[in-house]
Image (tube, grey):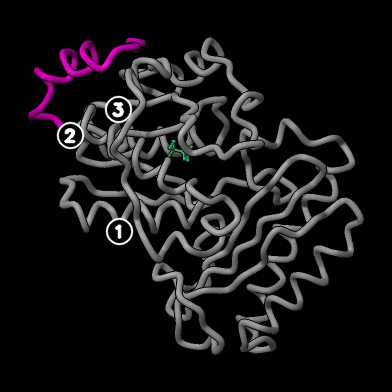
Amino acid sequence: MKTVTTVKDLRAFLRPLRDRRIGLVPTMGYLHEGHVSLIRKAREECDVVVLSVFVNPLQFGPGEDYERYPRDLERDAKIAEQAGVDFLFAPSVEEMYPQTPLTKVTVSRLTDRLCGASRPGHFDGVATVVTKLFHIVEPDRAYFGMKDAQQVAVVEQMVRDLHFPVTVVPCPTVREKDGLAVSSRNVYLSEEERKQATVLSAGLREVAEKVKRGEMTRASQAIEYLKRRISSKPLARIDYVDVLAYPELTPVEELKGRRVIVAVAVRFGSTRLIDNTILDEKEETPCSAR
Ligand code: PAF
């Protein structure tokens, strides 16, 4: 594995490999099993695997955790090498943003709800940095986790709208044994917050089961159930609980015969966690549980 810190060097390394299938796994580092599953999928499907590690300041709002976001490039490099990465691209902020950027990429409507509503400007930051990474790496395939299903919908829309010659590959959420979705931010949680946070995956699983058994047929019932279930944990502060058509992210009420996302964002202390499940009448099991 080669660690590369400049755009110029990465392009030079990739130039002779352009006839091979290049896979990109974009991350903000502090790698965990979720990232490793993306790398493994890229390794299976591509000849060359590029992992980017860049904590993108553009996607953090004022007062968010940009400064304290966990960083450990040495640890990331070991994990990346073991998982089969060929190029670890770890640019500095100055390398990615040599001047204050005057250009940004905005995906409208899909970003009005869920995390887009709670974190204004967040998805502009994501779409802008992903666009830059796509231009730098020119990947054939790019791998994203479904834990951030709204991000997947936004990136897929952007790829279609702007004719990026890349296939977006959404990958299932990876969970701890007790169901908690793995996230770099889980390290912020105290022992008690970590214990109570399992209510997110448990609540989502219960909703999926109720819908499957026909006991829950309406979005409002799922929202009410989850709000009650999550609020039973004294440390939980709900940011949002919503049910929307997926990937359109438009409001729905009747669940039958549709593909919907049941999505939650909840604070435990200063840590904001997100999780979701996709319910699809046409599928045997919810995507995120596979
Ligand atoms: O999902 C993330 O880690 C980030 O939003 C991404 C896609 C790497 C862009 O900074």
Disc marking residue 157: 1
Q: Earlier in the sequence, mark 2 or mark 1?
A: 2
The residue located at (73%, 41%) in the rendering is: 271
**Image location (x, y in percent) of residue 118:** 60, 55
Q: CA distance from mark 3 to mark 2?
A: 9 Å
Q: Is residue 32 left or right of residue 269?
A: left
Q: Residues within 10 Å of mark 3 (few under 14, many from 20)?
A: many
Determine the image quadrant of residue 210. Answer: bottom right
Q: Amino acid at mark 2?
A: Arg
Q: CA distance from mark 2 to mark 1?
A: 22 Å
Q: Amino acid at mark 1?
A: Gln
Q: Is residue 8 left or right of residue 118?
A: left
Q: Which residue is mark 2?
A: 21
Q: CA distance from mark 3 to mark 1?
A: 23 Å
The residue located at (60%, 81%) in the rendering is: 212
Q: Earlier in the sequence, mark 3 or mark 2?
A: 2
Q: Residues within 10 Å of mark 2 (few under 14, many from 20)?
A: some
The residue located at (70%, 37%) in the rendering is: 186
Bounds of the magenta segment: 1-21
For this rendering, which residue is in front, 181 or 52?
52
